[in-house]
Image (cartoon, helix red, strand yellow):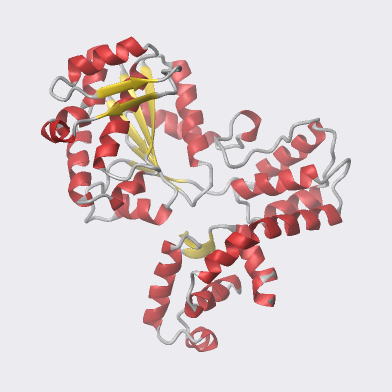
Amino acid sequence: MIKSPFVFGKVASNSAFINRELETQKLKNNFISGINTTLISPRRWGKTSLVKKAASELAMENTNIKICYIDLFGVKDEEEFYEIWIREIIKASSSKWNDWLKTAKEILKGIVPSFSFGIDPQNDFSVKLNLEQAKKNISDIIELPEKIAIKKGIKYIICIDEFQKIAKYNDSLNFQQYLRSKWQHFNNTSFCIYGSKRHIITDIFESQSMPFYRFGDMIYLKKINEIHWQKYLSLSFSETNKSISDDIINRLIAAVKNHPYHIQQLAHQIWINTNESVTDKIFNDSIDELLTFNEIMYIREIDDLSALQISFIEAIANNEKKLTSKEVISKYKFGTTGNIHRLKKAIESKEIIDLFENKPEFIDPLFELWFKSKYLKM
């Protein structure tokens, strides 16, 4: 059985990593120069894949650079932040677990964290802190990568995913202020920061009232040009002994609004439904199948909305150009222009729409398809 050539829901690499040559080189240049970088884009546009590609290429080219990946997705407070911070930074410093212990003892003298190892230390290694000790030595914890870098004569690039999670911590602003006050003085450590909630990440790094304002370079990812998708999709089908016409390729890309995750997802569904050549029926059936697979989740999203919020989504789905015009307010019964701003903010916080280049767009193009073709016709 031939394996599907399409990748979604995990980091894309090798042939599944499409284009992004300019962005990759930009990131590598920032990393080499020690410039802090924040990646901004809607969800599932391939930020993690881009970071890992740029970082892995650079690490292969320069063994003096150590890459540290930190995912804050399940990290709910400062204490857990410190523990994962210590663990990942120490792991990135060496491939030998006995070096980790030696480094921790030499640099974290006042803390004495507790380490535990599984059968495979590289993948089963945890750190526990005494909270009272940690509070007295927070400076040593936060400065850990810089101190290791100086001691070992290396440079750290710390890539932090789901950074917006720190906005939910208790006393978050003071915590952010403390991190910024330390990180901005690092000379041997730089950061690449990104996350799945674009509007929160943008607020953290673009708002003048926030501690991380102008922390470094901001890279705004744009959609991958259709020509790269066309080449990739055609080649992927042909290399697995299946064919797809240029017309259907273009319809596939258009159906999901050039969204990287959903192009891969829809292409995979079409691929598994195809024996030899993709037909119009296979294309349409594949879209219907994806909408059916996701329908329960989409219904739950709709059930969590007010009638006015649903009307606002309908206006966006209908491509209304002037949401604050008298005609649109009357047509959808929005009441006042003030309601428009509140509705926009509410729908954005629920991650249904995103303001991309000042234009409201659906984050999930399949949800938009379902909403227009299924929900509005119920």
Is 116 or 343 nearer to us in this picture? 116
Q: Residue at x 16, y 25 (%)?
A: 111
Residue 311: image location, x then y, percent: 53, 78
Q: Position of residue 70 (x, y in %)?
A: 38, 33
Left or right: 74 in relation to 103: right
* Quadrant location, the C terminus: bottom right
Q: Please, is residue 76 above or below residue 96 in the view?
A: below
Is 323 situated above or below 354?
A: below
**Which of the two residues, 239 or 297, is positioned nearer the viewer here?**
297
Q: Is 201 placed left or right of 240 in the picture?
A: left
Q: Quadrant of residue 158?
A: top left
- Residue 45, above or below 199: above
Q: Give the residue furthest to the right.
A: 276
With 125 as the anchor, is 367 left or right in this view?
right
Q: Residue at x 54, y 69 (%)?
A: 302
Q: Return the x and y of residue 74 as percentages of the image width and height.
A: 39, 42
